[in-house]
Structures are given as structure tokens and as C-alpha cells.
Image (cartoon, rainbow, N blue to C red):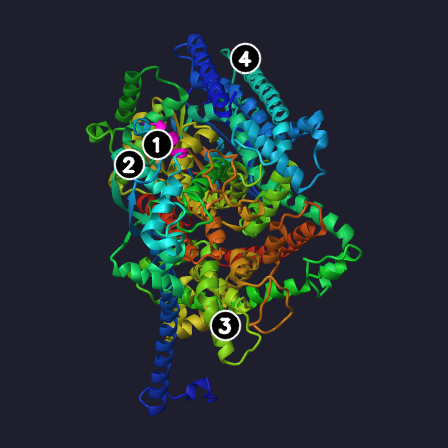
Amino acid sequence: MSNAAPFSTRRPTDWATPAMQSRVRRRYRAERRFRLLGLAAVTLSGAFLLFLLGSMLLRGAGGFLETRVAMPIDFARASLDVDPRRLQGRAADLALAGAGLEGAVDDAAVAAFGPDLGGRILSDGAWLRVREAIKDDPSVLSRRVVMSLPVASPIDVAAKGPGSVEAEAVVASLRSGDLLSTGLNREFLLSADSTDPTRAGIWGALKGSILTMLVTLLLAFPIGLLAALYLEEYAPKNRWTDLIEVSINNLAAVPSIIFGLLGLALFLGTFGLPRSAPLVGGLTLALLTMPVIVIASRNAIKAVPPSIRDAALGVGASPIQVVFHHVLPLALPGILTGTIIGMARALGETAPLLMIGMRAFIAAPPDGITDPATVLPVQVFLWSDEVGRGFVEKTSAAIVVLLVFLLAMNALAIHLRNRFETRW
Amino acid sequence: MSNHPPKITATHVNVWYGAKKAIDDVSIDIDQDSVTALIGPSGCGKSTFLRTLNRMNDTVANARVQGDIRLDGEDIYSPDMDVVQLRARVGMVFQKPNPFPKSIYENVAYGPRIHGLASSRSELEGIVQTSLKRAGLWEEVKDRLSDSGTALSGGQQQRLCIARAIAVDPEVILMDEPCSALDPIATAKIEELIHALKGRYAIAIVTHNMQQAARVSQRTAFFHLGQLVEYGATTEIFTNPREERTRDYITGRYG
Amino acid sequence: MTGPALLLLLAGLAFVGWLSARARAVAFRAPKRRFSSLPGHHAWYVALWTILPPLAFLGVWSLVSPALVTDAVLATPAAAQLPPPGFERASILSEARELAQGDAFGAFQPLARALEPAYAAAQARYDWIATAVALLLALAGGGWAYTRVRPGFAARTRTERIVMGLLLAASLVAIMTTIGIVVSLIWEAGRFFARVPAADFLFGTHWSPQVIDPRDPGASLGALPLFWGTFFIGAVIAMAVALPFGLMSAIYLTQYATPRVRSWVKPMLEVLAGVPTVVYGYFAALTVAPYVRDFAVGIGVETASSESALVAGSVMGIMIIPFISSLADDALAAVPASMRDGSLAMGATPSETISRVLLPAALPGVVGGVLLAVSRAIGETMIVVMAASGVANLTLNPFESTTTVTRQIVDLLTGEAEFDSPKTLAAFALGLTLFVITFLLNMIALSVVRRYREAYE
């Protein structure tokens, strides 16, 4: 456009001039740079995801394992007050409860490792393993056996990686005697929170999450679905409908912590429901998830072609029959996909649950929706705050469990979407 | 001309979409035992008018209908009229074939089922079979009734939609450009079918194919800009139109 | 009666109603009468009338009854020894409730043991009332509906009207939630502002809720540093990270990537978006924070904190990348293909087309998306709770410690303070501020996006 000459006298562009050629080359270089910039952005995002998942996996892997030390126990010499005949069936726990087993295990540790190390080498939960072993095979009570028992947290940490100088020395000496072994930490998956990292497990939090999600699903799915059907199929276009739409769109973008404040003020303050309960957590998360489900469901319903509705109306189906016989079945895959994604979001939600007191230390898995409980992400948060170094790997391991659930849900949603997505 | 009283009488019908008037003071009778064709250029309101006859315009959010439309003397816009029953009595076939994404059998059985027209399984099967036979589709699909209706060819899909409409035993069938999405062979089959159905149902068909109107209908109404320009026996309209606009349209000056 | 048993019984009653209404309708149904309501419609009409009234009652009851039970317990003589309302009283009451329900076996507080019988009695009494009323409602509703089952009755229309009512009620839950949020925030915040002048709160620069002077609570509750920190972390640092990455990813994915690449990268971004914020927070605190602090000390920032704004903000930015990317993706996709073709047909390179034609055309959509992202970033809680500081600090230095509104809400509400101290109420005032700001941002963003979409439709 720099050429100011009149159009008629303008000469044809000579693309072969060096100036034009270098201009074209410069433009192509700019093109390549731009493209590389985009590729870099995508690659870096991907690299970050890999780094995040990788570091959690690496650090968390140790959380699923425990270090055990081989230790001889001479039951014959320990003064255990147990009647071997009562060690059958359900009476066994009772019989062993008052037998002084814990003391006997401590004595055996002192005998094996000396008074100093013996008092702090074993995990607090070691004697429970001994109890299980006795229940499995009562005949050990009459002889001397070598058992592999979980070690205390500082030694466990030192055995898996860098630990305190003192603990590393202990590990080195135990290793030289070939006394250490590594095994799957079953307690991590089967027990609830504990102050001792070697005994802390995620089952309590997992059960709390399951109960909470159950309440959320039972409330948010039907309400969200029905609301979406109403808004998309029946709602008259008026100010009330607009108000509902604005509410839903806004609720979907309200910070989750605000829902926590609502739960605190309404469910705990006004209605006096129990603190820390999955019921209240589920109610709060249901309010948070419902708008997500409504928006996803509306999109799925909108995607059903109007000709299907016309066809059904044309043979005399009522508006309700049109929706429940035709529209809903066709939109259901999309609705379920949206619901799963909403539930995945609720499963990872932490802040609102802190507000309603689900951050308490809960040492027993909840039995019902009104028992005090915690949930997986809150457990992650609680453990991340713990001072004990043994909790670092537990936190990462809990994150791995949480991510496994979330990825499974997302994969299911993506699968549903690809499998049932209909193009009209 | 028929000597029955008309099946549907529409008098002074006006339709608005929001502030826009789509139908301006139209009065037509639809006769029993004959085919009435509604013709006219695109956007002239013929489809809109057809959809007032079974109140399908109710589903359009801002549509407003004024005037008097009676089916066998019964006001179909009266508050006592149950739309569901009305639409079962006045069936409809749409421009684009729109079978349900279900089996052929389910497509036809759906109407009788929601209206409770069959008291047993075998009775329902009978209805499905008769409807498919009347729609001239039975021979082609009798071995694959459980196949999806959407897997049929376009012409077959449209005949399936006609079978679906017939299955609820309507008194009137409205057809909204039923052949516009079909090839000539499928079109010929549908026209044949319309001939065969004529004796049993009152039929109103919207078409912008004038040859088709001439071939299948006994009476023709010409719409232009939302108004009814001329209405009379098809032979009259096509050979000796009274109105200038009708003649121009039929001879292809515009449209 | 326990909850599940009662629900089962109600479902059973509804089923009985369904069966009997159906039988009655079948009996009077003339074989060829067309278009009367089908037996199934009559059956559903009766079933819905049987189950809905008691369910509605139980729904309300389950929210109200805990308070009723507590009131009944407080009215007993044993409750006279209870300490005044506060944390101790609440814990005694909850322990007594657990004892009464058989959830706990031992009591730490002797008073809880004393209150247990009163709790059990009140609980049993109210449970009995609830069961009786629910069954009565079921029988009355079902019975009344059953008497209406006769040949001319328009059961289908009636049933559908009930269903329509349910649909409407469901969609009203959204409005009720919004009202609930607004009312509860305004109510508690109102009590806060009755004690602390709003000007002190909004414009004060000193925030230290740990020590509140009862004579002048406003002096240590100035939230300006919090607002600044929130803005600094969420709108400045996080966006500086998220915007270039998100936008370039969207451009690359929509304009350059092959379908194969897209089919891998899109789910990857979805996974990134699906990672819970608590994980990002842990990552920020444990992995990112030490590096950033060491780096800052290395370049000579003496005041560098391991709870710096930079750590929280940049990790938050990474969290927002998929969000920006997907919104920018939508905005670019809404630009008509003809615009792009027009530019390419003149010999413009793809990058020239994107930066001079597509992006300007998509700008309103992108801006709307960024506003939504900012709203999301300033409402984000877990990252700042775990990686940002608890100390309010009005600073421009990204390496210094900074706190945010959401972090302070969590800190204020997780101590065991009584429910109506200025400290607790301040959390609601902060919550109200946060709600208002995010609400405005969302409204502006949604209307910008909507107007933009309409422009190209």
C-alpha cells in the first residue's frame, strides 16, 4: 500500500526482487516462530502434568510400602496369660485383649535389639500383627518364632530414603544383619487416620468420601436433571425463567468456599445438623454440583433434534411423554457424562468441607451419614500439615489414590461421550 | 365436490410470530374423502397454516393463533380441547422424514401404545402390520421389524412416518411437503400412497411442486404473503385461475 | 422406625396404591373407548399422591427435627447445669447425642452421660411423631386420590401436572440456593458491620485478627491488604502465567494441530483441569516453594518467603491454563470460517491470519473468558491455604509473603472460636465481599460472552 501512484499506472508486483524475497522469507520465519510458540505452550502444559503426576507417584509409591524388621519372639518364655483353647473364632480377640501381648512384644524387642533401640524400633501397631499371627496359628504360643514386624516411622523413612542421621545408622546396622524387608502396607488401605504415620490409613477418608458422594449424587442428580428438563423443554420465556437461568449460571461460577459458608450458616447454624458429617458435606456439595449437572444436561437435551419432538407430538404424545419417552433417553449419555464430571469435581473439593468441620482428626471410619468423617482431599490437606516426615509419603500416596478415582471417573465420562455421542 | 359437511372448517384465521403476522385472515374448509393441496411460494404461510390445524404451533414459543378452527364442528382451540387427543385425530407427516431412533416396530407401535389402542400384544402387532401395509412398506420391512427405523432409505423412512401416523387411526392426515427431501422414485411411491389413502382419511398436503398438487389433489388453495389468494377445485385452479397472482405463480413468473 | 425402613414402607404403600388404582381402572375401562386415561395413568396418579406428601414432610422434618430435639433436651432439668452457649456446650450436646444414638460408648464429659436419657427420649418421641405423620399423609393422599379414580377422570393430565410441578420445584432449588447464600452472608456480615465500621474493614490497612481489641475491633480488621493480596495473586501473577500458555495452547490446538494431536492433547488438558486444587496446593508448598525461595535469596531478595505470592500465583496460573484454553478455543471456534478463508485467500500466512483477523474478532470472547478465569482464581482456596502466607502484607514484591481473602476465611473459621465473635463474623464479611466481586465479574463475563456469540450467529 506504500505505492501512492494511481491504480492504472501501477506496475505489476515483481515477486523475484531480493527485497520481496527476503520479505517473504521473513514472514515464513515469523510463521514458524509463532507455530513453535504454540507447540511450546502445549508441550510445557503437558510436561507440567507429567511432572506433577510423576512426582506424586514417585513420592507416593513409598506410602503403599512398609519396612519390616525380622525379630525373634519366644512366646514360650513370655508370660502370656492366654488359654489356647479359647483362641477359636470370635472369642479370640477377647482372649488376647487382656493377655499383655503389647508388653510381651516390647520385651521381645528389647531382648533382640537392646534396651535403647528395642524401645523405639517397632511401630506402635506392631503388636497387632503379632496378635493376628497368633489368631492364625495358636501353636506359635508354645515356641520361639521369628516375625517380620513393621518398624517405627523414623526408621521407615530412613530405610526408604534420606532420614535422620541416627535412624540411618540404625538402618545400616540392620541391613548389614539382613534383618530388613519391604512389603505391601495393607493397613494404609484398610485403616483410618492415626497420629503414627506407619499406622495411618486412608480407608476412613475413602469411606467418608463415598458416603458424602452418595448423598451428593442422590440429591444433585435428580434435582439437576429435572431442573434442566424444565428449563430446556417447558419453561415459558419470562422474567422468572431468566432469573433461574442467571442463578444457575452464576452458581456454577461462585467460589466453592462460599458454598462452605452457606453450609456452615444454614445446615450447621440454622438447622443444627451434626458437624463433620457426610450428610452435611453431601448437602453442601450437592448445591455446588447441581448447577454443573444442570448446564451439562441442558446442552445434552438441546442436542436432541427438534424433529424427534415434532414426530412424537404429531402422533399425539403429551409434552411429558415426548420428553420422558424420547428426549430423555436420547440425551441420557450426555447427561451422565456431565454428572460424572460434576461428581469428579465434587470428589476433589476441599475448601467447603473445611468450613463445615470435616477437618477433624477421625480415627475410625464412619458408619453412617451422620457420623463424624473426613474425605480424601481433606485427608490430603491434614496430612500435608503434619510435622512427622513419615506423613510426606502418606500424603502423596493419598493423592495417588484420589487421582486414581478421579482419572477413572474422567475416563468413564470420556468413554461414555465417545461411545454414545450421536451426530444428527 | 363432496356432499358431506366439511371435516375441518377454518374461518378468519390469523397467526402472529411475535409482532410479525404470518397468516392474514384465512378461511378454508378441508373436505372429508379428498386431498386438499396448499401451494404458494416459500414463506407464504402454507406450512404455518397447516400446523394450526393440529395445534403444532403451540410448541413455537412466540406464536399466537386467532380465529376459529373446527374439527367436526368442535372448536380445536377451545380450552376444553385436549391437544393430545386432537393430534391423535389429526395426524401429521413432516417435511424431513423423522423416524424415532428406535426399531421399525417400535416406531409404529409407539402411538397405539401411548393411547392404549391395543389391549393385547397380538392386537398391537396387528395394528403395526395393518399400518405398514397401508403405508406400502410391509413387504419391504416385514423380515426386519427390529432394525432401526433410521437405517431405512429416505423414501422408506417417510413411508414409515406415514405408517406411524396411520397407526393411531386418525381422521385427518396433514402432510408438510412430505416429498421435498426425496428422490423422484420415492416421491412417486408417496404420491401413489396418497391416492390409496384418500378414501379413508381427509388429507391436507403442503407442496411447492405444482405438478404434484395437480396430480394428487382434488382441491387446491393458493397462498401468497400470508393470505389465501384463491381456493377451489384443482382442475379449476390449474386451468382457469380467477386471480392474476395465481396465474403468474402457476405459469412460473415467480415462486 | 428407622429412616430406610420408613422409606421402604412408604414405597410399599405407593406400590399398593399403584396396583389397586390400576385394577380399578382396568375394571371400568370400556374395551374400545378411545382416549380415556389409561389404567397406568390412574395408577401413577394414586402412587404419586401416596408418596409425595410424606416425602415432602420428611424432607422438611429432617432439617428441623435436630433443633427440636435439642430444644426438648434443653428444657429438661438435667440441662440446667450446662455451661453457657459456646463450644463446650456444643461438644457436650453432641456427645450426648452420639451416646443416645449408640455411636459412642464412653463419654469424656459426665454431663453428656446425664443428658443421654433425655436425648434418647426426645429422639424417640420425635421419631414416633414423624413416622405417624408420614404414614397418615401417605394414607390420606393415596386414599383421596383413589376415590377420584373413575371413568371420566383425566388422570393423565393430572399426573402430568404433578410431574410438571416437580420439575418446576427442582429448578427453583437454584434460586433458593442463591437466596440462601445471599441471605446467610448478608445476615452474618450485617452482625459484623454492627460492631465494626464498614470503612474500617474495607479501607483499613492493618489486619491481625488474632488480637482484637474489644473496644476498637476495626483497628485490627482492615482488609485492604487481603484484597490487594487476592488481586495480586489471582489477577496478576496467575493470569501472567495462564494467559499466554492458555491462549497459545488454544491457538495451536484449533489452528495448527492435526486431529491426532488434538485427540491426545484435549483429554490431557481435561485431566489437568480435573486435578483437585488440594493437589496443586501440596505441589506448590512442597515442590515449588523451596526452589522459588532459594532462587529469590540467590538473586539477593533478603525478605524472600517460602510462602510467597509468586509460588501460589504461578501454580494457580498453571491450574487455570486448561480453563483459559478451553474458553479461548470456544471463542476462536465461533469466528466464522469465511473470515479466516478470506484472509488466507489474500496470501496471508496462518499466523498473520490468526493475530490480525481471528484474535481481534474473537477478542470479546477471550476477554469474557479471562474475566471468568480471574473470578475463579480469586475464589480459589486450597492453593493459597497451603502455599500462601497467613500474614497480611501490603507489598508489591512477589517474593514476599502475601495472604488472600479465601485463606483468611479458612483461618478465621477453623479455630474453635464461638459462633458470634467478631473474628468468626469477619469471615462472613470477607465471604460477602468475595461473593459480590465474583458475582459482578461473572455477570460481566457472561454477558460479554453472550453478546459475542450472538454477533456471529
Residue type pointed to by label 1: Val
Please state if A359 lies on the left or on the right of B159 as rendered.
right
Residue denoted by label 4: C143
Q: Is residue C177 magenta?
A: no
Q: Are marks 1 and 3 on the same chain?
A: no
Instruction: Locate residue A238, reporting x and y percent.
Output: 61, 41
Distance between mark 1 and mark 4 Cα atoms: 65 Å
User: Which numbered mark, 2 or 3, is in the foreground of this view?
Assistant: 2
Please state if C323 lies on the left or on the right of C62 as rendered.
left
Chain of the residue on which disc 3 is drawn: C
Circle 2 Cα neighbour tier, 10 Å, few/some/many (<14 / 14–19 / ≥20): many
Residue denoted by label 3: C293
- Against B114, is A332 above or below? below
Tell me the element at label 2. helix
Q: Earlier in the sequence, mark 3 or mark 4?
A: 4
Distance between mark 2 and mark 4 Cα atoms: 69 Å
Residue type pointed to by label 4: Gly
Closer to the camera, A56 or A332?
A56
Instruction: Locate residue B39, reporting x and y percent.
Output: 42, 39
